[in-house]
Every structure is written in C-alpha cells, then in structure tokens.
Image (cartoon, rainbow, N blue to C red):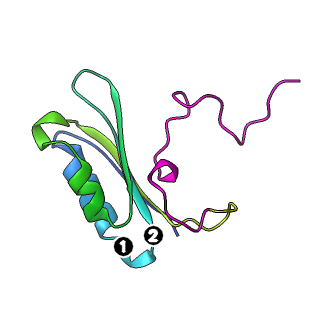
Amino acid sequence: MCGIVGYIGKRSAVPIAIEGIKRLEYRGYDSAGVALINTENELNIYKESGKIIELERALPKPSLIESKLAIAHTRLASTAPGSFSPQSEKAAPTDCHRRGPHPCRKRPR
C-alpha cells in the first residue's frame, strides 16, 4: 500500500511531509521518498529503500533543503516482476522528465 502527503505553506515543508508519511507507516511500505522545489525553484528528489529513517538519514542538512512545497511518498512494491525487492531507484516520487518518456504512456507510431 502507498501513502502520499503533500504540503504547501509558509513553514518548512520537508519535515511536515516526512512527519505525514510517518503517520502512515502502519499501512506497510518498502521504500520512501520526498520531492521538493527549493528556494532556487529547482526540483530535488530524495528516495531510499527501507524505512523512513533511511530517507531521513539520506537527506542533506535542513538548511540545504529549505522549501515551502514538498510531497512525500511511501511505496510497497507489489505489481511488476522483480518488484518485491525494495530498490532506491524504484522508490517514489519519480521525475519522468529526467528519465525520458513515462513507461506507461503510449509512444507515437
């Protein structure tokens, strides 16, 4: 099962989004990630397999990820072949623009 929490506001968004997915831990997951728009309007994505604490350990110092907008996600791998082993690169959120076309979209003929 997945859990998604987003925040847009005046406070620092990353701690709020992370706290939100911690409250959804009981639902089960194998990886977690957070995406944010930093103060230079750049998209930053951080994700790790394992528990949310692993994601927190992988995040830069709070002063380096200041953002007023963030979305955090937990993922339970359960559908694709080989997806039962948690992997950081399969963790959400995903930036489709950095990895080429989304695999679910039909390609032009």
Q: On the image, which quarter does residue 66 sit in?
A: top left
Question: How far across and down, in percent of the image, does residue 55 sit?
Answer: 29, 56
Q: Which amino acid does label 2 sit on?
A: Tyr
Dots 1, 2 in contact, CB < 8 A: yes
Range of the magenta residues?
83-109
Residue 41 inside the magenta-drawn segment: no
Q: In this view, does 48 lie to the left or right of 95?
A: left
User: Residue at position x 38%, y 65% from top?
Assistant: 50
Is 109 in front, or is 16? 109
Count neighbours of disc 2 (C-alpha within 10 A) and say few if under 14, some if 14 to 19, many if 20 or more. many
Q: Is residue 34 above or below residue 65?
A: below
Q: Name the residue under label 1.
A: 25
Main SS, magenta residues:
loop
Q: Mark 2 points at which residue?
A: 29
Question: How far across and down, in percent of the image, does residue 32 sit?
Answer: 39, 58
Answer whether residue 16 is visible to the viewer in this image.
Answer: no
Is 108 in front, or is 88? 88
Gap in Å between the C-alphas at discs 1 and 2? 7 Å
User: Residue at position x 15%, y 43% from top?
Assistant: 11
Q: Is residue 25 above or below residue 37?
A: below
Q: Which amino acid does label 1 sit on?
A: Glu
User: Residue at position x 54%, y 27% from top?
Assistant: 97
Quarter of the figure that contains the C terminus: top right
Farthest-out residue, bottom: 26
Answer whether residue 106 is visible to the viewer in this image.
Answer: yes
